[in-house]
Image: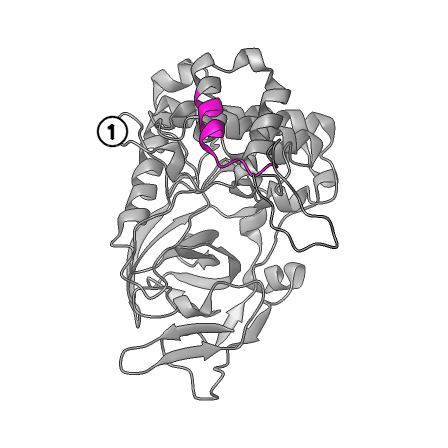
């Protein structure tokens, strides 16, 4: 069940639909209700849905002016433009950096490992003004591709190398790709949105094949099928408002499986999602504010949480991503506690490679935690007595 509230009425409850964005975010300040075959900006015909996040929905569209396919990111209207402006400004800066003669001569390849913005515009709808931008579409992400199979080893090596060069390009521009941070309220009923923007395999995409643009929409449908749409219904049975789309569209996967990847696919790698990218020389972000899952968090965010994060945290994320590219499974499990993850990090890297100050800080934290272990002088009752333990 998904709920939302509209001016002048109580909470609206919707039937739950698995695998789609939160329907309660279709309200003023939230998502724009995009429908299949809509034409945005008098130019882009919506063909299918590629994905969604806390701040946007992403759609495959046919650019009827340029006769090509694009991915359109339609941002929510309640973000005060902060997140989309951050992302587009970073992408423009990286595009300039990537094309500069100095950068290329310094060893950065001409391959475009970060998205290039093709167009930017704003659309108006029942939920407000929505900043949008278009990029070349991708066939899928590496996490979906490698869910149950390994990449061929030569492909895995090329993917790892290209991802490292993408991160190097980002860092050479003075940016840290980011982590998962709790953001301030957006004056919406859903209060907080967590944006997943770390360097991990769901944010590593692969470009579509070179002949993809040659497909007509009918040929695209014949190859990939019709959009999978599910009617949206209110629990109270009342008609939907214009704020909500009549159907929720499941995301289409254009990609292939890991075992079918080629070197050409690996050379189409794209590092995506720059909505929380930041410049550490201008903006301080502490480790304790990072909500990246503990298993993927950099050691400094755990051991010295009051220290600012910077480029090393990206390098840690890069290392974990490369491990998953080569080995399919994550290096650290998702069910362990912070203490267990730190112990595993020390075990993997070696105690001697951690700064002494980090170890001392972590040990002090451990001493300050409440010790729930039995005390040596405690008295415990037998099973047949109702005594209370005393010390």
* Nearest the eye: 242 or 292: 292
Determine the image quadrant of residue 216.
Answer: bottom right
Instruction: Tell me what residue is drawn at x 63 percent, y 34 percent.
Output: 332
x%, y% of residue 203? 51, 41
- Is residue 314 something that shows in the picture? no
Query: Which residue in the structure is indicated by mark 1?
Result: 282
**Would residue 364 be counted in the magenta stretch?**
yes
383 or 216: nearer the viewer: 383
Q: Position of residue 13 (x, y in %)?
A: 45, 78
Percent position (x, y) of residue 383?
A: 74, 52
Whether residue 59 is visible to the viewer of this picture, yes or no, is yes
* Residue 69 falls left or right of residue 43: right
Horizontal side of 228 relative to 85 (left or right) equals right
For this rendering, which residue is in front, 266 or 26? 26
* Front residue of 348 and 16: 348
The residue depicted at 47 percent of the width and 24 percent of the height is 362
Mark 1 residue element = loop
The part of the chain drawn in magenta is 361-374
Quadrant of residue 336 within the rendered picture: top right
Q: In which quadrant will I find the C terminus? A: top right
């Amino acid at each position: 069940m998904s709920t939302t509230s509209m001016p002048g009425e109580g909470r609206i409850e919707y039937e739950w639909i698995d695998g789609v964005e939160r329907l309660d975010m279709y309200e003023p300040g939230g998502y724009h209700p995009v429908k299949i075959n809509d034409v945005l900006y008098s130019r882009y015909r919506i063909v299918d849905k590629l994905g969604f996040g806390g701040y946007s929905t992403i759609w495959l569209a046919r650019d009827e002016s340029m006769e090509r396919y694009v991915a359109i990111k339609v941002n929510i209207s309640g973000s005060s433009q902060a997140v989309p402006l951050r992302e587009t400004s970073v992408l423009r800066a990286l595009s300039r950096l990537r094309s500069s003669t100095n950068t290329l001569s310094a060893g950065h390849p001409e391959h475009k490992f970060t998205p290039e913005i093709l167009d930017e515009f704003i659309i108006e709808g029942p939920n407000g003004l929505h900043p949008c931008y278009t990029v070349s579409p991708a066939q899928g992400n590496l996490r979906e591709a490698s869910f149950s199979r390994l990449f061929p080893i030569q492909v895995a090596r090329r993917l790892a190398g290209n991802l490292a060069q993408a991160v190097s390009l980002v860092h050479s521009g003075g940016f840290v790709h980011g982590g998962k941070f709790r953001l301030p309220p957006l004056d919406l009923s859903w209060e907080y949105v967590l944006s997943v923007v770390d360097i991990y395999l769901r944010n590593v995409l692969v470009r579509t094949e070179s002949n993809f643009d040659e497909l007509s929409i009918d040929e695209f449908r014949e190859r990939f099928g019709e959009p999978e749409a599910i009617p949206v219904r209110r629990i109270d049975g009342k008609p939907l408002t214009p704020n909500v789309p009549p159907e929720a569209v499941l995301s289409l996967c254009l990609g292939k499986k890991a075992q079918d990847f080629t070197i050409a696919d690996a050379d189409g790698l794209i590092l995506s999602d720059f909505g929380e990218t930041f410049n550490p020389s201008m903006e301080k972000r502490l480790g304790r504010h990072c909500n990246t899952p503990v298993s993927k968090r950099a050691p400094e965010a755990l051991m010295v949480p009051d220290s600012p994060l910077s480029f090393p945290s990206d390098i840690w994320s890069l290392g974990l991503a490369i491990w998953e590219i080569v080995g399919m499974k994550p290096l650290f499990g998702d069910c362990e506690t912070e203490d267990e993850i730190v112990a595993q990090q020390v075990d993997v890297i070696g105690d001697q490679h951690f700064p002494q100050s980090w170890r001392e800080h972590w040990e002090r934290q451990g001493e300050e935690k409440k010790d729930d272990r039995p005390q040596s002088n405690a008295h415990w009752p037998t099973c047949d007595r109702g005594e209370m333990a005393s010390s």
